[in-house]
């Protein structure tokens, strides 16, 4: 049994690692075997940051972009109702409707 354990330790040492607890080379040897320490790790990190940023932008656009359109639609609806009730004359209605359309095109 001891022979087998010594053989396993020798194989691990040959691969750059160690089975001894507390040995700092064990972990570094295992990490370098996968090629993760270096350009690949940096590239993965940058891609992860870009993915998180894109996700945050998409969520922001969905939340705030839609709310802006909803506010514009609500304003137009209120204007239409006021005109239908006779609170506004035709000229005032058309001027305000044009102002809303201009504001919507400048915001988008």
Image (spheres, rainbow, N blue to C red):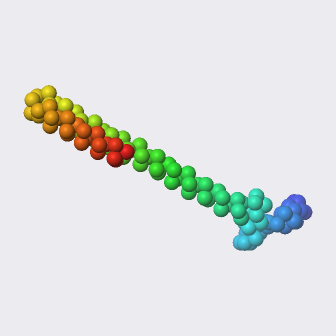
**Viewer-side residue, 42 vs 35:** 42
Residue 9, image x and y in percent? 84, 65
Residue at 87% in and 65% down:
14
In the displayed structure, 22 sits above or below 100; it is below
Q: Give percent across and percent down for residue 69.
A: 33, 40
User: Toward which corner of the image does residue 47 lie, by quadrant?
Assistant: bottom right
Identify whether 20 is placed above or below 36: below
Q: Which residue is painted at 19% across and 31% down in the image?
A: 80
Q: In which quarter of the image is the C terminus?
A: top left
- The quarter holding residue 76 reads top left
Measured as percent of width and height from the top left, residue 40 is found at 70, 59
On the rendered image, what quadrant is the N terminus found in? bottom right
**Residue placed furthest toward the top:** 84
Q: Is residue 26 left or right of residue 104?
A: right
**Residue 107 visible in image:** yes
Query: Is 49 situated above or below 55?
Result: below
Task: Identify which residue is drawn at 84% across, 67% down.
Answer: 13
Q: Nearer the viewer, residue 18 or 61?
A: 61
Q: Is 4 situated left or right of 69 in this image?
A: right
Question: Would residue 74 be visible to someone looking at this image?
Answer: no
Hey, which residue is sitting farthest front in the picture? 91
Q: How many labels does the image show?
A: 0
Left or right for 42, reference 68: right
The x and y percentages for residue 35 are 75, 60
């Amino acid at each position: 049994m001891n022979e087998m354990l010594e053989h396993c330790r020798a194989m691990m040492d040959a691969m750059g690692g160690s089975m001894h607890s507390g040995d700092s080379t064990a972990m570094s040897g295992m990490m370098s075997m996968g090629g993760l320490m270096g350009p690949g790790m940096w590239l993965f990190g940058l891609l992860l940051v870009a993915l998180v940023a894109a996700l945050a932008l998409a969520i922001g656009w969905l939340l705030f972009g839609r709310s802006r359109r909803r506010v514009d639609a609500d304003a137009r609806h209120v204007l239409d109702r006021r005109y239908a009730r006779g609170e506004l004359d035709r000229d005032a209605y058309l001027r305000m409707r044009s102002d809303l359309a201009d504001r919507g095109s400048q915001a988008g």
